[in-house]
Amino acid sequence: MPISTLIIEDESNLAQAIARFLSRRGFDPAIAASVEEGWKLFQEVAPHITVVDQKLPDGNGLNLLQRIRQSDPDAVVLLITAYGNVTDAVEAMKHGAFDYIQKPLDMEQLLALLTRAAERIRLRQEVTYYRERDTSQFLGNSPPIRKVIEEIEKLVETAERDLPTVLLTGETGTGKGMIARLLHRKSARSEGPFLEINCTALPASLVESELFGFDRGAFTDARQPKPGLFEAAEGGTLFLDEIGDFPLQLQGKLLKVLENKTVRRLGSLRDRPVDVWIIAATSRDLEALVSQNQFRADLHFRLKIVTLHLPPLRERKEDILLLAEHFLAMNARRYRRPLVGFSPEAKETLLSYRWPGNVRELAHVVEQAVLLTRGERISKEDLRIDGGSLREDVHRVNPGKDGEEWKKLLDRFLEAHWTLPDLEKALIERALVRTGGNCSRAARLLGITRDILRYRIEKHRIRYRETF
């Protein structure tokens, strides 16, 4: 589901610009122009994230921040401050603001902050759900998964706090993020923070400032020093997702952190010691990237000290129904739907489908079915997958686009009266499912630029949950 975001800003043009920018990136924005209107909307909408300007026509954003936090101590609030107004920013952080951003707004910086905020919300929801449960049982019970869990147990028992770098490999959606969080929770660092960054989501300049931090004056907008994620994760764990997309020009700097356990902020001459456990994940073949000179061999060696591979869901079919029942229970509880399970036909469909998007796709399919079903059990129709048919044929088809199998598949589309726009929309939707809503990777999969993909998403009015 989209992240609901309340924007409390009296400058109408700015508020509208923020709303447009965020809505194109998978957020669901609402706008208020004053303290009272913002407070009223906050109570009505209960947004995931609130972005509030410090100066509003009928009051003070700081006071509204305090009011919101008193009402909901878990509320995630981002404060917009005037250029150079450090005092308000410090006060905001003292009163529980997630972070602050200064005017004039840098939209990419705002997006980076909101992405981090959305991740915090997701983690908090997950922690709440799993607090009294053993997470490992929801990864599956097949031999490959049991082996991964056994390796995790051995690792955290043997290494205690001085843990080696762990590399998680596997296709998109196999549960690498869940394994990373399980590793953190089972380790001696579980009381420390768990932070994560998706290396695909941000341009190299933002990856550098987000990870390493910066000193005042490091670049034009660096008005105040800011620690990076390496420092923020002190005593805990930092998860580098999609490390295969880590900018080549920054890989030497990352290697130095791994080897020396120190970090140097942008614009600084001083190395700062850091105590952080690094877990990395990739859905790409790092050895192939090394041979293509797209990834440093020495960094690859440092990352793969311990490697855990997660097999795709199609190779562990015994986990499908177990996971589906788990996602059903979780979403039935979240949406307050009195559901008791799946129909026999639905179970058959779940087992016969190939799940190219793996566990993530299964989770999305079940969540959608929970929202759509009108009965006590989820039916085959509620799942909105065909268990084979055209999708299965796409996987079996000869990759050569001049082959007979390919021609037969195209004939089937024509016989079913699919138009070119139908095919384009379906292909984009499947690419988004396979990449878990990651636009950069979906664009790469489709062989187009990210901007063209965004244009076509809007053109076809495709609704999806974007990840970063």
Image (cartoon, helix red, strand yellow):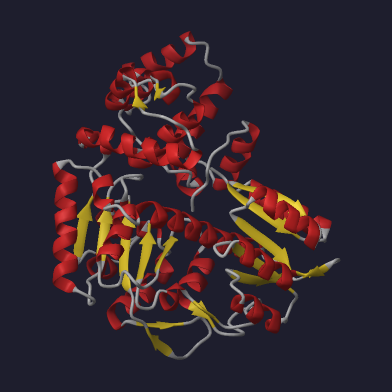
Q: Is residue 406 left or right of residue 318?
A: right
* Above-or-below relation of 357 to 47: above
Who is closer to the viewer here, 360 or 272?
A: 360
Q: Is residue 52 visible?
A: yes
Q: Residue furthest top?
A: 415
Q: Is residue 19 visible?
A: no
List x then y, in percent, for residue 146. Answer: 16, 48
User: Residue shown at 50%/34% (left/top)?
Assistant: 428
List x then y, in percent, for residue 449. Answer: 54, 45
* Above-or-below relation of 361 to 184: above
List x then y, in percent, for residue 60. Answer: 78, 71
* Above-or-below relation of 92 to 355: below
Who is closer to the viewer here, 418 or 127?
A: 127
Who is closer to the viewer here, 433 or 5?
A: 5
Tally the numbered discs: 0
User: Residue shown at 54%/39% (left/top)?
Assistant: 464
List x then y, in percent, for residue 353. Answer: 31, 26
Q: Is residue 72 left or right of residue 235?
A: right
Q: Is residue 84 left or right of residue 119?
A: right
Q: Is residue 178 left or right of residue 318?
A: right
Who is closer to the viewer here, 55 or 73?
A: 73
Q: Residue furthest right?
A: 57
